[in-house]
Image (cartoon, grey):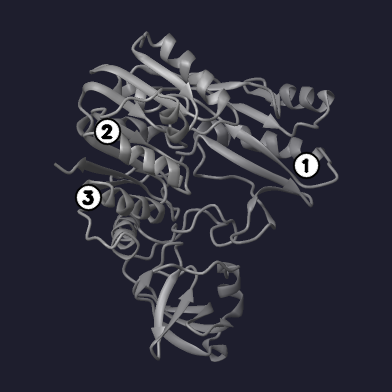
Amino acid sequence: MNAPRFKSATHEHAASDGASSRAEGVATVTGIANRGIGVARVGGKVVFLPLTAPGDRVAYRIEREGARYSVGQVIEVQEPGPERVTPFCPLFGRCGGCQLQHLSYEAQRALKRHWVEDAFRRIGRMDAAVDEVTASPVTVGYRNKASIHVGDGRVGFLRAHSHDIVDVPECPVLEPRLQEAWPAVRMWAHSVTHEEPFRMMLRVGQEDSPLVVAHSRTPAKRLAQLAAALPHVRVAAGGERETVSYLCRGVSFDVEAGTFFQVNSAQLESMVGTLEALAPGGAVLVDGHAGVGWPSLCLAPPYEQVICAEIARRSCERGIANARRAGLDHVRFHRGTLASLRCRGALPSRPDVMLMDPPRDGLLPRDLEAAAAMAARSIVYVSCDPATQARDVARLQKGGYDLVRVIPFDLFPHTAHVESVALLTRRR
């Protein structure tokens, strides 16, 4: 079920409102919608109840009444459901970074599998064979990147469904080296003033020291102060081409500070292991959204030729350098989309495997048409949004492919996000 977007209630509200005598009703939560919001049914109508768990019996009041559904605020959890646990972060419910800390980790995994199944059934109109969600090796201290918001005297993250900044003294889902740098970064950020709120970035690789990227308009004197406060952390202004490095399957990936790379370093090896099983080798592998080369460089050795398409210039340049440094001479990068490169004759017909890992919005229509027309023997589609993946897989089925299986991965514990890998084979 799709949950509406709205400013959610917080645990603070639930605690301060107290007595159930103010409630408009009492309901039992029966499920969690795809944004991590609890669902109850009252008199045949759906009521969305933020920060609830399946089986919770709660007193609530209506905050917004709609024709098809209502949005409520929990006043009191009268009976907790069996999967409810105590959140490990005191800011859960205020900070918008996590949505599922109040659920046991096994419940989170089961929920994310259900979301993937539901997306393929509801949007793709198919009953997909969905594996159990592959658990993250670590569930706290896993994020290698954080986008920090600074403004109004606060340093932290945005409140859920809001542009308000929540002041965050510490964040337990950040990698330990970022947690160590966090207090000094916050102290420095409080001393820097801009006319408007601004963002900073904290990022760390596996082979180098943490990197702090400040606002592009930060004076050099201020950057020097931050560098002095953090002698073991690299400091750069926005726009500079500083890099961090990640290692996977013996391949080192240099990534520029503002360039996309998976935020859960600990899960990379597991994902590549699955991709190797789905794409075990052959004559030609085409990667339609190659980025800086992950995971195609890891998959490259058993192929005679690997062709990588990437539209972003800097990512393409880094991918070329990463392949060269790894000694992968049979890997070629081309800048452009699948559709544009196919028109230019840069992509072959009938490759053994087509690998696709598009942004959250999914495949552009022209790229989807190009992928189907290339008639690869199999397509491996990696996605961070089951809804757009299900939509695209349904279209690829019309283009001559059958869905074999879907394998979800938990790259984002305690959040309402799930990564999934779909294997499709060309219909004979």
Q: As displayed, is residue 420 above or below residue 91?
A: above
Residue at left 77%, top 25%? 223
SS category of the residue bearing label 3: loop
The residue type indicated by label 1 comes to: His
> SS for tag 1?
helix
Give the CA distance from mark 3 to mark 2. Answer: 14 Å
Residue at 38% x, 33% y is 266
Q: CA distance from mark 1 to mark 2?
A: 44 Å
The type of residue carrying mark 2 is: Leu
- Residue 24 in sight here: yes
SS for dot 2: helix
> Which residue sits at x=48%, y=58%?
99
Relative to 111, 264 lies left or right: right
- Residue 360 picture location, percent across and down: 47, 47
Of discs 1 and 2, which sits in the foreground?
2
Q: Which residue is mark 2?
A: 275
Residue corresponding to mark 1: 190
| Distance between mark 1 and mark 3 Cα atoms | 46 Å
Q: Which mark is residue 131?
A: 3
Q: Quadrant of the C terminus?
A: top left
**Residue 375 screen position, x and y as percent:** 26, 36
The 10 Å Cα crowd at callout 2, few under 14, some 14 to 19, many 20 or more, is many
